[in-house]
Amino acid sequence: MVLPGLVDVHTHLRVPGGEHEEDFATGTAAALAGGFTQILAMPNTSPPLSAPAAMATAVAHAQRDIRCDVGLFAGASPGLTRHLPALAQTAVALKIYLNDTYGPLRVEDLPTLHACFRHWPRHKPIAMHAEKQSVAVGIGLAAAHDRPVHFCHISRREEIELIAQAKGRGLPITCEVTPHHLFLTRADAKRLGPLADMRPLLGTADDAAALWAHIEDTIDCIATDHAPHMLAEKRSPTPPPGVAGLETALPLLLTAVAQQRLTLERLIQLMSTNPRRIFNLPQQPNTQVEVEMTPAIIQNEQMHSKCGWTPFAGMTVAGRVSRVILRGQVVFENGRLLAPSGSGKTINN
């Protein structure tokens, strides 16, 4: 089975400041192993991508190390909104954190929020980490400023139902969900312990059912929120939230296709067509992902991510990536990574 190159609009590649957990070379290796040929990296790094110097550092490292195509988010930060026009020259989109996040990027005041909507170029997307009542804040801002807002990792019934209502009224909003919120619940969190700690936290079985109920009409993208941490960190007294996701997303969604929870056509929309359209990303000629639809078991030992583990280890899935071709070059084949560091392109939309 042949699919177009997949697009993941929500990854954490840890550069700068967290290279012991992931870097551009290993993160993009994981992306290709999972069938993703374009990915977008989040700005809550150390230092965050909220000032031109940090952005320039990240771009330089990306150009040297990436194996697939990568775009960078700029981060909204109180007191630093004056940098937004300069950041927009490089970043593909702006990320606003209305809820808890690592580092100084949480935005809680209306002046900063309105400044972001005024100063960020209208042709570039704005994405929000918004949970529960913060989703209503984001919808209100989209309406007040009459410009699109994309909601990241929606995970609760009340959130997806509110978004469905807002879309029904014609408001310019889109949203994504993650595989871990579709396939895992609080019951799995009890079983996995800190290995299932993430933000947003895993929901109930009813929350997951609500996401599946809206998979055909309300949800626009599947995004991994790939956020790797080393096992020693996750097993420490203060485990950081986040799990790897780039290499398991497509096998999980192919399993949903095999179980008739999702059509193949809808999978392509959610993981390729829609994210590329929403974030104004360039087409990639002569690019495709070949999939072998035979049962396989997800194994930690097969991971290309630097962290080397996944909460889905041991799960049987319906298919796997067998080959990835990017711009006419075979970059991944039967478990072997063939793309050298630096062969990817940085994205500027």
Image (cartoon, helix red, strand yellow):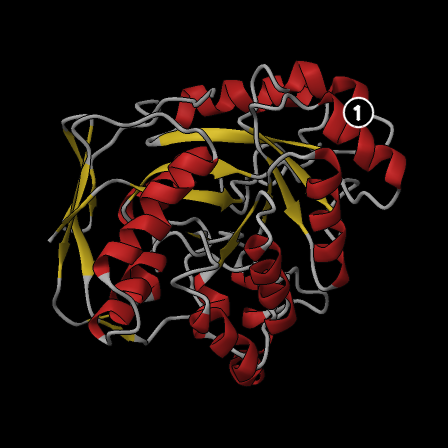
Residue 291, how many percent across, how many down? 15, 54
The answer to whether residue 285 is left or right of residue 58 is: left
Q: Is residue 39 visible?
A: no
For the point 33% across and 31% down, which residue is it? 67
Above or below for 254 versus 305: below
**Residue type, mark 1 in image:** Thr
Q: Secondary structure at mark 1?
A: helix
Disc 1 crowd rating (10 Å Cα; few below 14, some 14-19, many 20+) is many
Looking at the image, the residue that sits furthest to the front is 169
For the point 32% across and 76% down, which residue is it? 314
Above or below for 202 versus 34: below
According to the picture, the residue beneath numbered tag 1 turns out to be 81
Residue 266, how many percent across, how many down? 29, 57
Q: Is residue 114 visible?
A: yes
Residue 307, how many percent across, how many down? 46, 54
In this rendered view, identify the residue nearer to me: 201 or 190: 201
The answer to whether residue 4 is left or right of residue 236 is: left
Above or below for 53 versus 47: above
For the point 81% across and 28% down, which residue is it? 115
In this rendered view, identify the residue nearer to me: 316 or 255: 255
Residue 50, how many percent across, how many down? 71, 28
For the point 66% across and 40% down, which residue is it? 44
| Number of numbered labels in the structure image | 1
Q: Quadrant of the N terminus?
A: bottom left
The answer to whether residue 272 is left or right of residue 279 is: left
